[in-house]
Image (cartoon, rainbow, N blue to C red):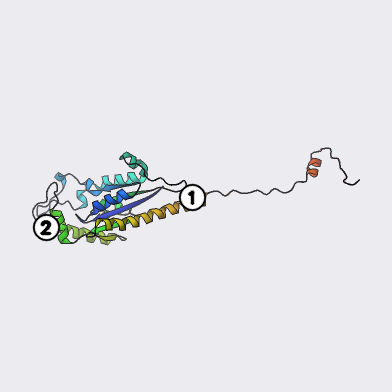
Amino acid sequence: MKTLVVGIGGMTNGGKSTLSKSLHEQIPNSCIIAQDSFFKDDSVVPVDSNGFKQYDTLDALHMDKMMTEVESWQRDPELFLRGRGLTSECTLPLGNEEVFVLIVEGFLIFNYRPLNELFDKKYFLEIPYDVCKMRRSSRVYTPPDPSGYFDGYVWPMYLKNREEMQSMVSGIVFLDGLKSKEELLAAVYKDVSQETKRLTDVFVSEQKKNVPTKKTEIVGFIDPLKMMTATGADVKKVSCLN
């Protein structure tokens, strides 16, 4: 079995969840682990000097629990899928190999080193400040954003986290979040599909190398007369002349 871990990060309201879900629907044997599912309870999230809840930090997340989920998938992807009501969808010819794909989605996935080291593919969605602010204001959060939260906390933290990410991570493909969902999906799907095909080809090649070669043993001619003489059999010589 081959595995592929895809990271889809990005700023708030950049389209990472939409892209992740669309990709999951297109890729057989895939599943999503979303960072937003691991926020700590609001009561334990600290408040800064401006009275803003500090949600946009790793300390606001149960990253240990998130890593436990990822490691569970790594140990046995097929069992992981079954445990979540998903099943293996890929039926390949005998001799080929299924590739299981984990899509990890979140706004700080590339800022957490233990997780970041696992990614085979990395994508980061970006949109301009004004678009991000407009999208953020149109969504309802629990708890709701207080007045001034975007400019006073969300955007400054995005810039800080992005700078930190770039200083510690390489190989990220930056995506324009203003492009249509179809365009973004097509680009990422093509890239991921090429990688799954490469992994399958590698497996097939390895299998061919490991197939034992049948050896043909060449047996020399055995003179039946000598064999009979050696065994003490009564040998009668018959002349072919009249």
* Residue annotated with mark 1: 207
Q: Is residue 87 left or right of residue 111?
A: right
Please tell me which residue is depicted at 40% across the width and 54% down the height of the picture.
197
Please tell me which residue is depicted at 17% across the width and 44% down the height of the picture.
41
* Residue annotated with mark 2: 152
Tell me the crowding category of disc 2: few under 14, some 14 to 19, or many 20 or more residues within 10 angstroms, Cα based: few
Q: Nearer the viewer, residue 69 or 87?
A: 87
Give the residue at the far right of this rendering.
242
Image coordinates of residue 203 in percent, x first then y, are 45, 51
Identify residue type, mark 2. Answer: Gly
Q: Earlier in the sequence, mark 2 or mark 1?
A: 2
Image coordinates of residue 174 in percent, x first then y, are 27, 61
Per the model, the C-alpha gap separating discs 2 and 1 is: 57 Å
Tell me the crowding category of disc 1: few under 14, some 14 to 19, or many 20 or more residues within 10 angstroms, Cα based: few
Q: Give the label, 2 or 1, closer to the camera.
A: 1
Image coordinates of residue 107 in percent, x first then y, are 23, 54
Task: Mark yes or no: residue 19 visible.
Answer: yes
Q: Is residue 188 left or right of residue 225?
A: left
Q: Is residue 182 above or below residue 235?
A: below
Task: Mark yes or no: residue 76 visible.
Answer: no
Q: Assign the C terminus to one quadrant of the image.
A: top right
Image coordinates of residue 139 in percent, x first then y, are 14, 51
- Name the quadrant containing residue 159: bottom left
